[in-house]
Image (spheres, grey):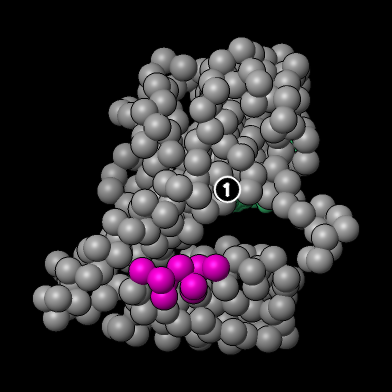
Amino acid sequence: MEVLDGKKVSNDIKNEIAVEVQKMKDQGEKVPHLAAVLVGNDGASLTYVGSKVRACERIGFESTLVKMPSTTSEVELLAKIKELNEDKNIDGFIVQLPLPPQIDTQKVLLAVDPDKDVDGFHPMNFGKMALDMSTFIPATPFGILELLERYNVDTKGKHTVVIGRSHIVGRPMSILMGRKGWPGNSTVTLTHSHTKNITQIISQADIVISALGVPDFLKAEMVKDDAVVIDVGITRVADDSEKGYKIVGDVDYENVSKKASYITPVPGGVGPMTIAMLLKNTLLARERHRNA
Ligand code: NAP
């Protein structure tokens, strides 16, 4: 069994990006600038946005954190997005989800300029991804592809079972694993809460990508020997630590790792890759703007 070490690979990627940024600085060019919009005070969202901003600083990007109160109206948020779309200094930006209930998330994601949509959530970018065109691939699925690639995991002709069909992880992952090329060329089954015989389907998988957010959902007896297991789940579970919680994935790591050929740990697997790929998308946005 080999651990797909997202912490190490994400650090490698950040170091590679930092080298590119240094080259830009040496040539007197503008460095990539990522902005993040955070509406409200959700604890997990604050943590995620904080990590993204710190990662930018570490590799030499410029970053801007736009904090808005939880009472922000849809009109106010749309006005802020228009401002960011028009700001030539900003190469890419993200709107941290979830948004408060008074705001229509779809409307907001549609308002983001596709050329600055480094999360890859705009329908235009999602459509391009589905058509194998060059675009911003959503950071979590992009990170999983990168892990499979850097560990040389064979995906051709394999049966990949994706659990969860969210627009940000499961659905795009199923499209990417089925596309022509590598990583890809898999035969994909996309499962969700209405899937019948899910245990039987998972037991036939060469590659399992679990993105449902249910701790310990995937047990050793559900996976076949030598399966590749990717755990996307991040759930806060209360414990006695100083923080008062620990982060757990969807997979019973201790037992599944004994059967798997490759497996991602939680924490330290897909999570850090997500941030690294957001930075990679921002670098891509800068390069596109420079060449436009
Ligand atoms: P989500 O929007 O929470 O949706 C969960 C999906 O799982 C839905 O498609 C749901 O089916 C399916 N599901 C729920 N219970 C199921 C069950 N018992 N059997 C089969 N399918 C079931 O998904 P998400 O936003 O992709 O998040 C999933 C997990 O990944 C969460 O823990 C989240 O925190 C984590 N996450 C991690 C990262 C990272 O960087 N590592 C990034 C994003 C998300 P229905 O569609 O039928 O409801």
Secondary structure under the numbered disc 1 in the rendered image = loop
Q: In the rendered view of the protein, which quadrant contains the N terminus?
A: top right
Q: Is residue 289 left or right of residue 136?
A: left
Report the magenta stretch's main SS.
Answer: helix
Q: Is residue 58 above or below residue 69?
A: above
Splitting the image into 4 quarters, where does residue 157 fall? Answer: top left
Q: Which span of residues is magenta-colored?
A: 51-59
Say which amino acid is labelled 1: Gly
Percent of width and height locating residue 209: 58, 33
Q: For mark 1, what is the residue? A: 268
Q: Is residue 30 left or right of residue 227?
A: left
Residue 72: quadrant of the picture: bottom right
Taking the spot 72% from the left edge, 85% from the top edge, the residue there is 71
Question: Whereabouts is ligand 1, in terms of quadrant?
Answer: top right
Give the x, y percent position of residue 108. Answer: 55, 70
Does the image show residue 140? no
